[in-house]
Image (cartoon, helix red, strand yellow):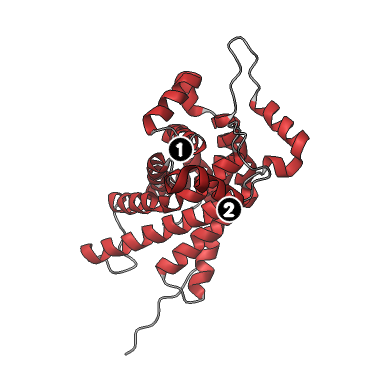
Amino acid sequence: MSQQPVELKKKPISFSNILLGAGLNLCEVTTLGQPLEVIKTTMAANRQFSFLQAIRHIWARGGVFGFYQGLIPWAWIEASTKGAVLLFVSAEAEYHFKKLGLNNFGAGIMGGISGGVAQAYLTMGFCTCMKTVEITKKKSAVGGVQQSSLAAFKEIYKKEGIRGINKGVNAVAIRQMTNWGSRFGLSRLVEEGIRKVTGKTSPEDKLTAWEKIFASAIGGGLSAWNQPIEVIRVEMQSKTEDPNRPKKLTVGKAFKYIYSTNGIKGLYRGVTPRVGLGIWQTVFMVGFGDMAREFVGRLTGETPTAKH
């Protein structure tokens, strides 16, 4: 007798899913996320810095608090919205791509790409831009009044409008679609490998928390292959003073400028903290999902869904 194909069921989207996405991202960015983001951005904007030089530079700007530049309000605004967008859009997209016949790996990649693009244009454009402004702008002299985050936002908006506060959003979109396409797709691929090794071949067989975290960490770390687009994004949004930088940068112009001044190495500045950030973010968004779902489910009385 021929075996009946497994019925493809759509994951329900609930309030718990939105709360889960926001909560996971807020925890991620408030712990190691923002310090790694600041180091990565500093190295990408100042491509002559080594890892240790970047850390010294950040410490000189503000001590421990220097590693949390841009956290409030921009990173918190971004974190509280982008997780919900990612989980909602990627879950919907993955379901529809599976209906079209894609396997877990292919549907995972396409779901991640869809969620990443939605993140960039709906929530991350202005937040990412303003975080980079905070990290790269020139500090006031001792005794001077430091411009606040909101004052910087108003100044840019007054001078350049919506385009000014969304500078580099196309680069953000390319980064996010390749980020989450890689992270979810590679995490799925590693999970399938773990299933073969451990004999958990049935969809009903659940991976342990440590197996999921391992798969997530590998997927997150390997997703740093797209570091050149991250360096391009930082260059487009940077407030670091550089008289040689072309005006009105596009993705193409930024690529040519970085390559002409710093070569291939310049396009990979900040890749070390980026690998760490990729692992940290993906472990939170993927590996810790089960534990968070159980907690949120008890809190709200709903059964939340996530990517894994």
In the rendered image, the vertical position of residue 193 relative to residue 67, given as above or below? below
- Out of 6 and 122, give the one closest to the viewer: 122
Q: Where residue 182 appears, x then y in whole percent?
A: 43, 57
Real-space Cα separation, disc 1 to disc 2, in angstroms: 18 Å
Residue under circle 1? 40
**Label 1: few (<14), some or many (≥20) within 10 Å?**
many
Q: Closest to the observer: 195 or 132?
A: 132
Q: Residues within 10 Å of mark 2 (few under 14, many from 20)?
A: many
- Residue depicted at x 41% and y 68%: 104
Residue nearer the viewer, 118 or 303: 118
Q: Is residue 183 left or right of residue 214?
A: right
In the displayed structure, would residue 150 be above or below residue 296?
above
Q: Is residue 231 above or below residue 215?
A: above
Determine which residue is flagged by label 2. Answer: 173
User: What residue type is disc 1 on?
Assistant: Lys
Q: Nearer the viewer, residue 273 or 207?
A: 273
Q: Amino acid at mark 2?
A: Ala
Q: Is residue 133 above or below residue 183?
A: above
Image quadrant containing the C terminus: bottom left
Between tags 1 and 2, which lies in front?
1
